[in-house]
Image (cartoon, rainbow, N blue to C red):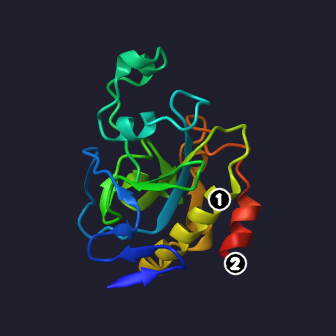
Amino acid sequence: MMTTTNSLTLNLQTGLLEPVLYQPSPHCDERPLGTEIDMIVIHGISLPPGQFGTDSVSAFFCGELDYASHPYFAEIKGLRVSSHLFIKRTGEIIQFVPFGKRAWHAGQSFYDGKSSCNDFSIGIELEGTDILPYEVVQYQRLSQAIFLIRQAYPLVTENRIVGHADIAPGRKTDPGMAFDWAYLKGKLA
């Protein structure tokens, strides 16, 4: 069974978007039994910070980052992090974890009376920083992915599409002030 937009399909059996590059991450596990997916968390990331177009985010999420290749990487050494999707500034989407599994993207988190947001959310990382505007093509690809996810997981309502800062205030700031929530909501309407 599949759900489709103009250029993407969500394979409900595999939990994967098609056609996108799938790079399986070891940084995931099964969701707690009986947990329903009811939230999307939007993140922003670039590795090294502020540098785009590198393969470092993919390597980090797959546990293959060469920590000696940049001084900043010493700060994140030992972290085991992933997301379901990563949307590059070019609009390319990479999937690391099938939607039915729990990706390790939220960390310590709390939203709407529930903690451990990884249990019930889908994490989508955008290549960017808190202060630089995201690319139009990233919003296009993000809105396509959200449309498919919401068809497959109807408990993901508009008010349950949040930023990392919303579930980990004081600890996280992404996707940052540069993320245009109004523009995204317009694309989803």
Q: Quadrant of the N terminus?
A: bottom left
> Is residue 185 left or right of 112 when viewed as pictured?
right
Residue at 60%, 35% in the rendered image = 170
* Residue indicated by mark 2: 189
From the image, which quarter does the C terminus lie in? bottom right
- Where residue 28 appears, x then y in whole percent? 28, 49
Left or right of 184 on screen, residue 149 = left
Q: Secondary structure at mark 2?
A: loop
Q: For residue 137, which numbered disc appears in the image?
A: 1
Badge 2: few (under 14), some or many (20 or more) residues near its Cα, within 10 Å?
few
Q: CA distance from mark 2 to mark 1?
A: 17 Å
**As drawn, 86 above or below 157:** above
Residue located 44% across and 38% down the image: 57
Residue 97: quarter of image? bottom left
Which three-letter amino acid code belongs to the residue tagged 1?
Answer: Val
- Left or right placement of residue 54 versus residue 64 in this view: right
Callout 1 secondary element: helix
Q: Residue at horizontal 39%, vertical 62%?
A: 120
Label 1 Cα crowd, 10 Å radius (few <14 / some 14-19 / many 20+): some
Q: Position of residue 155 (x, y in %)?
A: 48, 76
Image coords of residue 61 (percent x, y): 36, 41
Q: Position of residue 100 (x, y in %)?
A: 31, 66
If you read the primary sequence from the N terminus, does the residue marked by circle 2 or circle 1 appear first? 1
Above/below status of 9 relative to 134? below
Q: Nearer the viewer, residue 14 or 75?
A: 14
In front of the other: 25 or 109 = 25
Image side of residue 84 versus residue 124, left or right:
left
Label 2 close to label 1 by CB (< 8 Å): no
Identify which residue is drawn at 47% across, 14% down.
Answer: 71
